Structure formats: C-alpha cells, structure tokens
Image (cartoon, grey):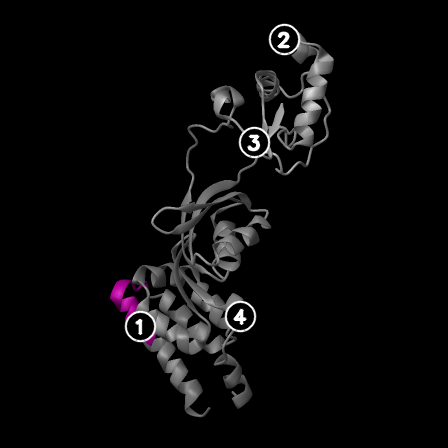
C-alpha cells in the first residue's frame, strides 16, 4: 500500500461521514468518530452493547470498507463477527484488531 | 367573528359551523345551514372568512393506512439537543418526508419529539443514522417503535369551544373546497 492510500485511510472525515454509535435501532449514544484514530478511542469509550449492535449488523465492516476505504481492516473485523464474541471480550478483540491495523498504517507513514 | 388585539375570536355560530365541518367536511352549505337553523349564505360567509383567517387550514381525507395495505412502521423519536441548535434541528427535520409530526418540549432539558414513519426497521435506522444523528447540535436520540395503537383522534371544537381564541396571522393555505 502506498503512502497516499495510507494517508487517505487516516484522514479526518466530514461530520456527515462519521461513524455514529447506536445501542439499538434508532438509539444514538451521542458518540461518533470522524477518523480512524477517533474510531479507536470510541471503541474504548462506548457501551459494549453498542459494539455488539454494530458488529453483528456488519456496520463496522461497511464503514471501514466504504468510508475509511480500508478493505484490510474490514476483512479483519469481519473475522471477529464469525467468532460470536460478546461483552468485554468482544471489546478487547475489536480494540486490538483496530489498533494493530492503525500501527501498520502509521508505522511507515 | 370579532377582531380584537390581532386575534380572531369566534362566536357561537362560528363554533357550531366548525363543529359541523369537523363531523363531516363534505356537507354542503345548505345541509350545514339546515342542521344549524341558519341560511346557507351565512354558512358560506362564515366559512370563507375562517378560511381567509387561516382558522380552517385545509380539507383533507383521513385514511386508515392499515386498511389501505400500508405496512409501514411508526416510531416516536426523542432528540436531545444543544438548546441553541434545537430550532434549526427541528426546522431541518421538517423537510424530511419521514417526519410526520415534530415538536419541541422543555422538560428538564430541551427535547425535540418527532413521529417518524418508515418502511421497516432497517430504513428507520438508516434515516436516523444518516439524516438525524449527523445534524449539528444533536447529542443523543431515543427511539421507540409503536407496536399497538389504542387511540388516535384530532382536537375537536366540540371538546372545549369556550376557551378557543386564534391568532390572526396564522398560516392560511386553504385546500380545495370540493364540497
């Protein structure tokens, strides 16, 4: 992956492209992420119910693939979905997955 | 009907006519006049004046959407906002066809309460996630889907006619009168 693509994935998005964290249909927590970095922070902060809601709907995969444009991260998150994690375990695995990808992207950036 | 302090006060004749229209807006002027014991020309004049002043806003059909085969879902959405942005959020949402009714409410904090219609849960969520949550000033949203309706009615003049006064400068878009 070239530097330009990495830079694009790590960019700050306009507000309307942010990821908005919900706990169920129509119930918005008030937390959102406008960048990869902020997405990591919010995974740590939001209620785990929100992470379960979005992971099993495929929302994280969709946003990372279509909005952040990071297909690799989307694939890794998709693998978590198949493992049926929940609660704190899900949060830890998701956090580690996203942080690891962030390290790869920012290392040579 | 008297004009006083920029408001339109309705007399008992006006209220009786409004009551008759709310029971059945397709009645002719003659039928209303006959049932109320007044000339059809009086009914006509009073109705036209109330239309001009925006007291009668429109004539419309009340449709039972379930019987009409619509399978939509209805939800009540409570939006917590920054008080400075509340009106802007409400005005923006007025433009969305999914919003059926919208109000602001001051309880412990300033809220927007809206009735929303959507084809299904997924389209409801998509609308809220892409069109409501991103609006500046929105801090939290709570949504409850309606599962069963026990009562739905409109405010009727007959409920409490004595307390009614109307602001003169109300919106006055009048629908076609096809009676």
The mark nearer the N terminus, 2 or 3, is 2
Q: Do labels 1 and 4 share a chain?
A: yes
Chain letter of disc 4 in the image: A
Q: What stretch is highlighted in magenta?
A: A84-95
Q: Judge whether residue A83 is colored magenta.
A: no
Chain letter of disc 2 in the image: B
Judged left or right of residue A88, residue B29 is: right
Quarter-of-image position of residue B53? top right
Judged left or right of residue A17, residue B42 is: right
The Cα–Cα distance between marks 2 and 3, rounded to whole angstroms, is: 25 Å
Which residue does the numbered mark 4 point to in the structure image? Answer: A66
Indicate which disc residue B166 carries: 3
Which residue does the numbered mark 2 point to in the structure image? Answer: B35
Q: How crowded is mark 3: few (under 14 residues within 10 Å), some or many (20 or more)?
A: some
Whether residue B28 is visible, yes or no, is no
Which residue does the numbered mark 1 point to in the structure image? Answer: A93
Q: How crowded is mark 4: few (under 14 residues within 10 Å), some or many (20 or more)?
A: few
Badge 1 element: helix
């Amino acid at each position: 992956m070239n530097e330009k693509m990495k830079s694009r994935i790590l960019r700050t998005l306009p507000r309307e492209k942010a990821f908005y964290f919900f706990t169920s249909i129509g119930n918005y927590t008030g937390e959102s992420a406008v960048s990869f970095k902020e997405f990591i922070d919010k995974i740590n902060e939001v209620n785990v119910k929100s992470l379960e809601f979005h992971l099993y709907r495929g929302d994280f995969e969709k946003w990372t693939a279509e909005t952040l444009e990071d297909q690799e991260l989307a694939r890794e998150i998709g693998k978590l979905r198949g493992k049926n994690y929940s609660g704190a375990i899900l949060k830890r695995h998701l956090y580690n997955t996203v942080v690891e990808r962030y390290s790869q992207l920012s290392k040579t950036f | 009907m008297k004009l006083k302090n920029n408001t339109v006060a309705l007399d008992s004749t006006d209220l009786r006519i409004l009551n008759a229209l709310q029971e059945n807006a397709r009645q002719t002027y003659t039928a209303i006049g006959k049932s109320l014991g007044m000339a059809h020309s009086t009914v006509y004049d009073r109705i036209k004046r109330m239309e001009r002043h925006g007291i009668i806003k429109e004539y419309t059909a009340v449709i039972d959407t379930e019987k009409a085969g619509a399978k939509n879902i209805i939800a009540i959405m409570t939006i917590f906002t920054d008080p400075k942005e509340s009106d802007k959020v409400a005005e923006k949402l007025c433009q969305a066809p999914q919003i059926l009714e919208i109000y602001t409410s001051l309880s412990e904090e300033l809220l927007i309460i809206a009735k929303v219609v959507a084809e299904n849960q997924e389209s409801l969520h998509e609308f809220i996630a892409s069109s409501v949550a991103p609006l500046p000033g929105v801090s939290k949203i709570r949504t409850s889907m309606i599962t069963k309706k026990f009562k739905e009615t409109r405010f009727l003049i007959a409920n409490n006619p004595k307390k009614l006064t109307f602001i003169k400068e109300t919106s006055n878009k009048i629908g076609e009168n096809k009676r």
